[in-house]
Image (cartoon, grey):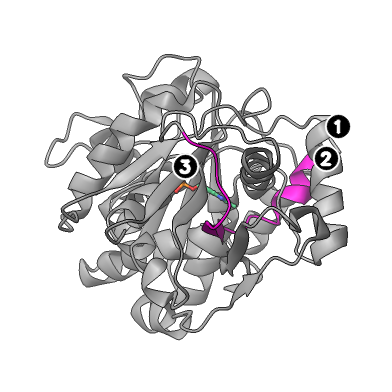
């Protein structure tokens, strides 16, 4: 099966939107829906599939046989890319931040799927991926400098040969295009769509497909996530999709719990309680934080941060995007964080 057939075969039309039935929300007058993109695929879950879809088909169209991408040692994107490339009959190379650890379940999974892993220091990783970001913001990232042989992209091609470079997290215009399909599958009316954010690629795709009177709230999982605003703008531009005439979107930056992959007892208790009451699993790094934020806004009338100065009020229908990421639990266990 080639990558384009593969892309088509996972076209996730009709993925369920379900109502979250939780006694905790009774009496709030807020209706909470969840789009279960975690069910797209066992290994290429949620938005990782969305972001790979057009990257893979573009790679095939350009006659590439090798995908090169980047990620941390527990990255959902690395796991998804390794699996998708193997299925699509393509080679994959993963540039991994940090050192090898053969007992790491994500790296094991990538190896089982024939990804070639190349380990680089944090500093080199940052240079390769996002040279202009300060060290503090663990860079999600990296864009190929179009047409330049001297940028990071050129350097990598010199070293690894001809390859199609996908930025960390699938963060490019093709990734945005895939994410712009999420809301087209939703028939139920809603007022506010909520989504966790790493690189902001998924937010960009959602923002571009908002209808008038709909709002989007992004929940950055990194500390100081306000910087995403600019990234989202740039990613929207890269997609070359036409923005709607009005776009009401903002970031709720208070639910990072200390930063990327940080777990706090309060968050763990919330995730466990949510899953017990609703039967819906959440991941520890992204959707757990988003859902915590949504509940805090509803139950404690927290305002929507930069988005707009109002809490999620009675009469509102919220659509939460379940972006997947459940493999992240293995990594949290492996690190002894849960
Ligand atoms: C990668 C990931 C995200 C972040 O998506 P971006 O498009 O990078 O903002 C959100 N949720 C889950 C489950 C993820 O794995």
Look at the numbered disc 1 and say if its residue's Cβ is closer than 8 Å to ligand 1: no
- Judged from the image, the secondary structure of the residue bearing numbered disc 2 is helix
Q: Position of residue 314 (x, y in %)?
A: 58, 52
Marks 1 and 2 in Cβ contact (< 8 Å): yes
Q: Nearer the viewer, residue 317 or 105?
A: 317
Q: Quadrant of the N terminus?
A: bottom left
Is 228 located above or below residue 24 in the figure? above
Q: Quadrant of the C terminus?
A: top right
Q: Is residue 211 visible?
A: yes
Residue drawn at 63 percent across, 73 percent down:
18
Which disc is residue 265 wearing? 1
**What is the CA distance from the residue labelled 1 to the residue labelled 3?**
23 Å
> Tag 3 or tag 2, which sits nearer the N-term?
3
Q: Nearer the viewer, residue 174 or 148?
A: 174
Residue 319 within the segment the image draws in magenta: yes
Residue pointed to by mark 2:
268
Is 185 located above or below residue 221 in the figure? below
**What is the CA distance from the residue labelled 1 to the residue labelled 2?**
5 Å
Residue pointed to by mark 3:
218
């Amino acid at each position: 099966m080639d990558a384009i057939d593969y892309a088509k075969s996972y076209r996730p039309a009709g993925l369920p939107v379900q109502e979250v039935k939780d006694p905790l929300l009774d009496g709030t007058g807020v209706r909470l829906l969840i789009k279960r993109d975690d069910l797209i695929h066992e290994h290429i879950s949620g938005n990782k599939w969305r972001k790979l879809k057009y990257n893979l088909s573009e790679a095939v169209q350009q006659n590439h046989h090798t995908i090169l991408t980047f990620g941390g040692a527990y990255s959902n994107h690395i796991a998804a890319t390794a699996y998708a490339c193997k299925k699509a009959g393509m080679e994959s190379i993963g540039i991994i931040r940090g050192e090898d650890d053969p007992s790491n379940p994500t790296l094991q999974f990538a190896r089982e799927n024939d990804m070639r892993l190349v380990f680089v220091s944090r500093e080199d990783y940052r240079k390769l991926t996002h040279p202009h970001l300060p060290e503090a913001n663990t860079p999600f990232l990296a864009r190929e400098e179009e047409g330049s042989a001297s940028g990071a992209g050129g350097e990598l091609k010199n070293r690894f040969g001809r390859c199609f470079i996908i930025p960390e997290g699938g963060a490019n215009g093709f990734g945005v295009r895939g994410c712009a399909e999420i809301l087209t599958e939703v028939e139920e009316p809603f007022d506010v769509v909520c989504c966790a954010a790493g690189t902001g690629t998924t937010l960009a795709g959602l923002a571009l497909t908002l209808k008038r009177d709909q709002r989007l709230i992004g929940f950055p999982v990194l500390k100081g996530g306000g910087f995403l605003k600019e990234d989202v703008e740039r990613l929207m531009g890269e997609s070359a999709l036409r923005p709607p005439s009005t776009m009401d979107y903002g970031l709720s930056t208070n639910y990072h719990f200390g930063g990327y992959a940080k777990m706090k007892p309060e968050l763990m208790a919330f995730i466990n309680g949510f899953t017990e009451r609703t039967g819906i699993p959440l991941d520890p790094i992204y959707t757990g934080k988003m859902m915590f934020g949504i509940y805090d806004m509803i139950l404690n009338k927290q305002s929507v941060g930069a988005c707009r100065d109002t809490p999620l009020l009675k009469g509102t229908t919220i659509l939460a995007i379940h972006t997947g990421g459940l493999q992240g639990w293995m990594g949290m266990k492996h690190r002894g964080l849960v």
